[in-house]
Image (tube, grey):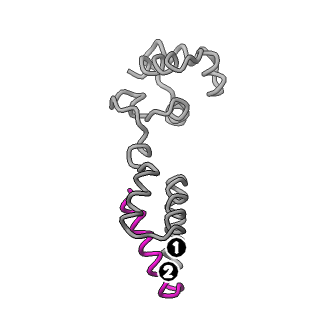
Amino acid sequence: MFSHRLKELRRENKITQRDLAKFLEVDRTSITKWETTDVMPDGLMLSKIAKRFSVSIEYLIGTTNDRRRIEDVFSPSLEEVRSRAEKMNLTDDEKIALGILKDLPLSKQQALLKETISDFNDLPDEEKKTVIKMISAYLSTR
């Protein structure tokens, strides 16, 4: 399944084996081998290939027909974030902050939320209310 999907994605994107090999920093014969045999690259290389074609590793190896990456499935659109923010009566600044947070990579989002939570007790009461409201808005978009 991987060999078929790799060849299909490469052709859909009009990329030669040589160009893909250059992007992945491998020899062109590796691409040929992956496309014509049951040999698959290691996990790191699968990740690079998936990222290059904006598909999930699961799609590449044939365990799903859904091309979307997991972060695309669970990450709401900016419009969805705005809509939920409207329902929560967030201020304009809070809406902007939520939009910025949403656009960060998931690992950065988690680190920022963890830092905010660890500093929570030191905040004035009014800021605590804002943090609670923002975290609630954020969680409602997950």
Looking at this rendering, what residue extends furthest in the left direction? Answer: 64
| As drawn, 4 above or below 142 | above
On the image, the x and y values in percent for residue 105 come to: 53, 52
| As drawn, 128 above or below 106 | below
The residue singled out by tag 2 in the image is 120
On residue 54, the disc is none
Between 46 and 128, the residue placed more toward the observer is 128
* Residue 28 placement: quadrant: top right
Region in magenta: 120-142
Answer with left or right where residue 48 lies relative to residue 86.
Answer: right
The residue singled out by tag 1 in the image is 116
| Mark 2 burial class by Cα count in 10 Å: few <14, some 14-19, many 20+ | some
Q: Residue drawn at (48%, 21%), measured in percent from left and top? A: 9
| Mark 1 burial class by Cα count in 10 Å: few <14, some 14-19, many 20+ | some
Q: Quadrant of the C terminus?
A: bottom left
Q: Residue drawn at (46%, 51%), measured in percent from left and top? A: 78
Secondary structure type for disc 1: helix
Between 22 and 139, the residue placed more toward the observer is 139
On the image, the x and y values in percent for residue 20 come to: 60, 22
Answer with left or right where residue 15 lies relative to residue 60.
Answer: right
Amino acid on which disc 1 is placed: Thr
The total number of labels drawn is 2
Amino acid on which disc 2 is placed: Phe
Q: Quadrant of the N terminus?
A: top left
On the image, the x and y values in percent for residue 49 come to: 53, 30
Labelled pair 2, 1 in contact (Cβ < 8 Å): yes
> Is residue 94 on the magenta stretch?
no
Q: Residue drawn at (55%, 31%), measured in percent from left and top? A: 52
